[in-house]
Image (tube, rainbow, N blue to C red):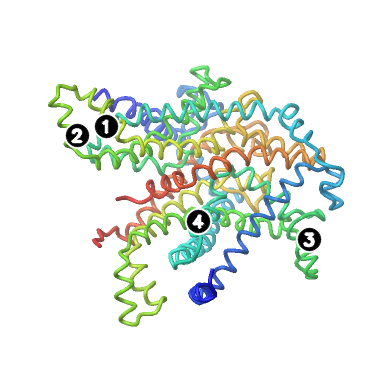
């Protein structure tokens, strides 16, 4: 059992103890992050009630829901499309696969900077600006991609562009495990590519889809870097719960009104996100029960 | 290549034309973005704004400026220390645990696997506040150990999970024969099983290396001094200041400095990296 002890201690230190303490803390008013429990003041559900009452926090929940739902559909759709493309006998498959996965291997800070300071830039050198200008499409060339109106859409597109490769890889690995004979038999029976996809591929990779939905949900709920890179100062258009928490607990901006820092609010945000994850997992388990597939 | 050969290739690929167009657009987009930023990083801010990149030659001083004046040499060193130390530490803790879970039957084994599985999906914001408090009380805030400890402990469940699957597929006979030959279980692990599990350990090691190198949230929270910052956090702070100063050439040089290490690693090891992703996400 000597072998297991360090791993168990890691788990206790990084997961079990902090989760329980955060949960407890969410029912208290806590002035300093390092304050011992004797300094905490019990306030029941006040932290939760105040959060739900805050328009900015409600907006952050709406934003991650939009990221989760709209972004999820876009990412999984394109990931499936590229996975099908790469299994269709296209040339240089390994190259395309590596290319589409590439954004996932680079720091999100660097990728997001490439988008905000070059692709979406309002300066004359901005990629989209100069491209649409060269094509003579004034209406598109004049769009302020990182202005209040489009910033959420711009951010979501950039985020999805990077995510597609990750889900494509996972779906691809699932599709490659399906025996080739199934496709050959069905082709002899006269099935079209579309029928093959809906009748063979989709049912056989349902567990992989499930994994994708779970992984996407984790990414959407923890959404932070991109929001901070697109809006260095939190604004309603791009705020997310993690960004909100970062500002309440670790930031020093307008959130700490009158020096009234309450770390308990941050703990409540953590608890709300965790509860959302649990609810979502249960929903996924009900909607797509895990099936043992033999093939 | 003979004409008939070429014709048969064209015939086979013809239905895939729209697919190739889509892939080529993706490729072109990637090349333009990376290529332009690369070019801009060697030019002056004036040239970037007038659309005359490279006009006055190559300006390597942008990189010198970023590495020395903007502390990127230090950030690079920090990222390297955090990432390499933590990657090794994770394996030292996870491999023995995965070996025991993968090879032996004991009460609570299933519960243990499920516990590790669940802990992988706990949002980091659910644990970060108490961890910060612990680090303050241990007087570790302001030391590089903070992030190393956090990077090790946070990645243990995934690594144990990944390696458990790997150990359980190794042939049991080898281990049995080692035990018969008088090896202790401990020796059997270090001498026989660990070398056999090497491909799995390298795969998960590279995966962890990339994940820690690019980690952002904990680095932002815990490395709260210039001397402690990682490349990603350093870049974020630099961008904010350079935007106000208006040093776009320097900004793009900083982006390339952060971009290149993992990009090169990825080009060299893309097969291994891809195997790590699919192996971790798809259960056997």
Pointer 1 indicates a residue of which chain?
A: B
Residues marked 3 and 4, same chain: yes
Q: Which residue does the numbered mark 2 point to in the structure image? A: B174
Where, by quadrant of the figure, is residue A293 drawn? bottom left
Q: Is residue A244 in view from this perspective?
A: no
Secondary structure of the residue carrying numbered label 4: helix
**What label does residue A130 carry, if any?**
3
Position of residue B60 measured from the top left corner of the image (x, y, whole percent): 77, 35
Tell me how far mark 1 sits from mark 4, CA to CA: 33 Å
Q: Is residue A28 in view from this perspective?
A: yes
Where, by quadrant of the figure, is residue A292 drawn? bottom left
Residues marked 2 and 1, same chain: yes
Q: Which residue does the numbered mark 4 point to in the structure image? A: A97
Tell me how far mark 2 sits from mark 3, CA to CA: 64 Å
Asked whether the residues under the numbered discs 2 and 3 touch, taking CB atoms below 8 Å apart as contact, a structural biologist would say no
Tell me how far mark 1 sits from mark 3, CA to CA: 58 Å
Q: Which residue does the numbered mark 1 point to in the structure image? A: B193
Pointer 4 indicates a residue of which chain?
A: A
- From the viewer's perspective, is B89 left or right of B163? right
- From the viewer's perspective, is B227 left or right of B195? right
Question: Who's the residue at 73% across and 60% down the image?
Answer: A128
Mark sitting earlier along the chain (3/4) = 4
Nearest the eye: B35 or B45? B35
- Residue at the top extreme? B139
Nearest the eye: A139 or B71? B71
Question: Who's the residue at 64% across and 35% down the image?
Answer: A256
User: Label 4 crowding class (10 Å Cα cut-off): few <14, some 14-19, many 20+?
Assistant: many
């Amino acid at each position: 059992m000597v072998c297991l002890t360090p791993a168990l201690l890691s788990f206790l230190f990084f997961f079990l103890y902090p989760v329980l303490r955060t949960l407890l803390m969410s029912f208290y008013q806590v002035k300093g992050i390092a304050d011992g429990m004797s300094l905490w003041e019990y306030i029941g559900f006040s932290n939760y009630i105040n959060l739900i009452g805050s328009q900015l926090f409600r907006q952050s929940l709406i934003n991650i829901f939009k990221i989760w739902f709209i972004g999820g559909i876009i990412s999984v759709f394109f990931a499936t499309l590229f996975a099908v493309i790469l299994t269709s006998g296209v040339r240089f498959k390994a190259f395309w696969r590596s290319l589409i996965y590439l954004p996932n291997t680079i720091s999100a800070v660097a990728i997001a900077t490439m988008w905000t300071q070059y692709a979406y830039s309002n300066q004359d050198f901005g990629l989209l600006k100069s491209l649409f200008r060269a094509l003579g499409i004034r209406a598109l060339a004049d769009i302020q991609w990182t202005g209040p109106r489009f910033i959420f859409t711009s951010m979501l597109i950039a985020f999805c562009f990077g995510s597609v490769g990750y889900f494509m890889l996972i779906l691809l690995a699932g599709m490659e495990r399906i025996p080739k004979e199934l496709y050959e038999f069905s082709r002899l029976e006269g099935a079209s590519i579309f029928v093959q996809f809906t009748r063979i591929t989709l049912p056989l990779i349902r567990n992989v889809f499930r994994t994708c939905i779970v992984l996407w949900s984790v990414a959407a709920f923890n959404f932070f870097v991109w929001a901070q890179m697109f809006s260095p100062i939190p604004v309603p258009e791009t705020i997310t719960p993690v960004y909100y928490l970062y500002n309440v607990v670790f930031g020093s901006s307008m959130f700490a009104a009158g020096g009234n820092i309450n770390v308990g609010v941050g703990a409540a945000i953590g608890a709300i996100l965790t509860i959302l994850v649990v609810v979502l997992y249960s929903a996924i388990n009900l909607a797509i029960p895990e099936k043992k597939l033999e093939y | 290549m003979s004409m008939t050969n070429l014709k048969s290739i064209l015939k086979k690929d013809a239905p895939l034309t729209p697919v190739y167009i889509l892939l080529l657009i993706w490729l072109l987009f990637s090349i333009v973005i990376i290529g332009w930023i690369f070019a801009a990083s060697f030019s002056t801010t004036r040239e970037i704004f007038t659309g005359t990149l490279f006009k006055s030659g190559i300006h390597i001083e942008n990189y010198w400026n970023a590495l020395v004046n903007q502390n990127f040499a230090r950030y690079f060193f920090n990222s390297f220390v955090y990432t390499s130390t933590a990657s090794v530490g994770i394996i030292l803790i996870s491999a023995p645990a995965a070996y025991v879970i993968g090879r032996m039957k004991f009460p609570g084994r299933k519960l243990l696997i499920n516990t590790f599985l669940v802990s992988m999906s706990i949002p980091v914001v659910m644990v970060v506040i108490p961890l910060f408090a612990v680090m303050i009380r241990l007087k570790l805030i302001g030391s590089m150990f903070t992030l190393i400890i956090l990077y090790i402990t946070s990645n243990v469940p995934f690594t144990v999970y990944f390696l458990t699957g790997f150990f359980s597929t190794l042939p049991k006979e080898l281990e049995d024969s080692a035990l018969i030959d008088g090896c202790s279980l401990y020796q059997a692990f270090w001498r026989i099983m660990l070398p056999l599990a090497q491909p799995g350990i390298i795969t998960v090691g590279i995966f962890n290396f990339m994940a820690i190198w690019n980690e952002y949230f904990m680095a932002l929270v815990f490395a709260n001094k210039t001397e402690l910052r990682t490349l990603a956090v350093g870049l974020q702070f630099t961008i904010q200041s350079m935007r106000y100063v208006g040093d776009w050439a320097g900004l793009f040089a900083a982006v390339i400095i952060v971009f290149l290490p993992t990009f090169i690693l990825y080009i060299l090891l893309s097969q291994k990296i891809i195997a790590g992703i699919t192996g971790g996400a798809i259960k056997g």
